[in-house]
Amino acid sequence: MDELQKSTIDSRLESILFQVEKPGRYVGGEHNQVRKPWDSVETHVALVFPDIYDLGQPNLGLAILYDILNQQPEVLAERAFAPWVDMEAQLRENAVPLFSLESKTPLNRFDILGFTLPYELIYTNVLNILDLAGIPLLASERGAEHPLVIAGGQ
């Protein structure tokens, strides 16, 4: 997928969100969401829960990491979740890469993607998320222009 500017993602989302069942999963704006200016920090981290928003947002580990990282003045942490099948189809059909909730930045623009893996059944979703973000699945195929991909869990 081509790397799109955030404004292009925002404009495409306006029409895409009308095509999906639960658009609130993809817009962000929750209470206590942290928004830092992209250019004001050195390190950009996307914390990714490889399941839908409804299951990932209440994850306490993700919330703790999000808070700790965003307390660091030179770190920006944003969240991303696996899309439901209707949104995945719309992203692919409209050539929109998977993005973060806070700033709608494509995941392939972050320095680090940190996946939380609380259970084995979502491991394959990591591959789908990388594909949707336009990031090579194999580490050997990634270069300096791609984010570092890390994962951890229980």
Image (tube, rainbow, N blue to C red):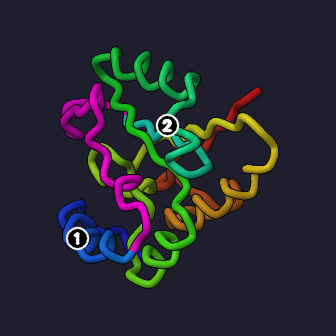
User: In which quadrant is the C terminus drawn?
Assistant: top right
Residue at (28, 18) in percent of width and height: 73
Q: Which residue is mark 2?
A: 57
User: Residue type at mark 1?
Assistant: Glu
Residue at (63, 36) in percent of width and height: 116
Asked whether the residues under the numbered discs 1 and 2 touch, taking CB atoms below 8 Å apart as contact, a structural biologist would say no
Q: Magenta part of the protein: which range?
A: 20-43
Q: Is residue 80 or residue 6 the one in the foreground?
A: 80
What kind of element bears circle 1?
Answer: helix
Q: Is residue 144 or residue 56 the one in the foreground?
A: 56
Q: Dot 2, crowdedness within 10 Å: few (<14), some or many (≥20)? A: some
The x and y percentages for residue 67 are: 40, 19
Q: Which residue is mark 1?
A: 14
User: Residue type at mark 2?
Assistant: Gln
What kind of element bears circle 2?
Answer: loop
Side (left or right) of 100 relative to 102: right
Vertical comparison of 48 with 4: above or below = above
Q: For residue 120, which quarter of the picture?
A: top right
Q: Dot 1, crowdedness within 10 Å: few (<14), some or many (≥20)? A: few
Q: Give the CA separation, mark 1 to mark 2.
A: 23 Å
